[in-house]
Image (spheres, rainbow, N blue to C red):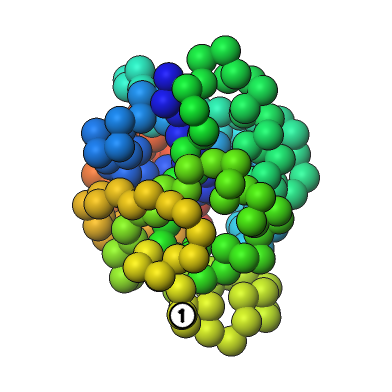
Amino acid sequence: MKIAMLGGSFNPIHIGHLILADSVCRSLGYEKILFVPTACPPHKAMSEEVEGTDRLAMVSRAVADDERFVAEACEIERGGISYTWDTICFLEQKYKNELDGKIGLVMGEDLLADYDKWDHAAELASKVDLILACRPKNTGLKAAYKNAPVGAYGKNPMKGVTRENFPFPHKKVENPKVEISSSEIRQKIAEDGAWRYLVSKDVFEYIKSRNLYAK
């Protein structure tokens, strides 16, 4: 079975994540996508207002009706800083009896400029099949890293590397550029804006029942 991993804070998971996973399956022939909520990302400051267990619960609800998608709890259960290298090593062992070939690692193009700073970056690029996804302009680095520690990504993290000149072996997926970000959804919830159809019905109901992100 061809298996790919889609990691992220999923704070919250939204329809853009699901569309990306569907694109990876349909375009590249992957049969299972592991959604892996991070416990503590090494290069990104994350709001502490929502527990990892809540983010995992939202992922579980978002993927429940698609047999290709799995909510993988390994990083939340492991705790501490979530390094992709450690997670891939764990997943290789967990799924060794059903895995066909390398695990695919789905990356948004907003992450590419700093991939060389990842733990075991070169070894990881050989260990997995890197899958580079499209990201719309307004949900890329500016949104994803606006809360990162000062200096964490240098002065201009968008300079240089793109999907077109990424120096490591990779595949590309031409997923639709859905202009949604988790930070935008959190803001809309806090401001009592319109966000209902940016997430799945079960995720919407979970957020409402737990009063998540509300001010």
**Which image quarter holds the N terminus?**
top left
- Is residue 31 among the parts visible in the rendering? yes
Which residue is depicted at the point 71% across and 40% down? 86
Which residue is depicted at the point 51% across and 34% down? 103
- Is residue 75 among the parts visible in the rendering? no
Q: State the residue lying farthest toward the bottom.
A: 155
Q: Amino acid at mark 1?
A: Gly
Image-based side of 168 in relation to 51, left or right? left
Residue 190 sits above or below residue 53 on the image = below
Q: Quadrant of residue 23?
A: top left
Q: Position of residue 140 (x, y in %)?
A: 40, 67
Q: State the residue lying farthest toward the top.
A: 97
Residue 149 sits above or below residue 139 on the image = below
User: Which residue has dot 1 on it?
Assistant: 160
Q: Quadrant of residue 33?
A: top left
Which residue is depicted at the point 47% across and 82% down? 159
Disc 1 packing (10 Å; few <14; some 14–19; many ≥20): few
Which residue is depicted at the point 54% across and 41% down? 128
Q: Position of residue 54 (x, y in %)?
A: 57, 36
5 vs 197, nearest the viewer: 5
Residue 198 sits above or below residue 155 on the image = above
Q: Position of residue 192 (x, y in %)?
A: 35, 57
124 vs 208, nearest the viewer: 124
Image-based side of 126 in relation to 12, left or right? right
Query: Which type of secondary structure does the marked residue at label 1 adopt?
Result: loop
Q: Position of residue 27 (x, y in %)?
A: 25, 39
22 vs 119, nearest the viewer: 119
Disc count in the image? Answer: 1
17 vs 184, nearest the viewer: 17
Image-based side of 7 in relation to 2, left or right? right
Residue 206 sits above or below residue 64 on the image = below
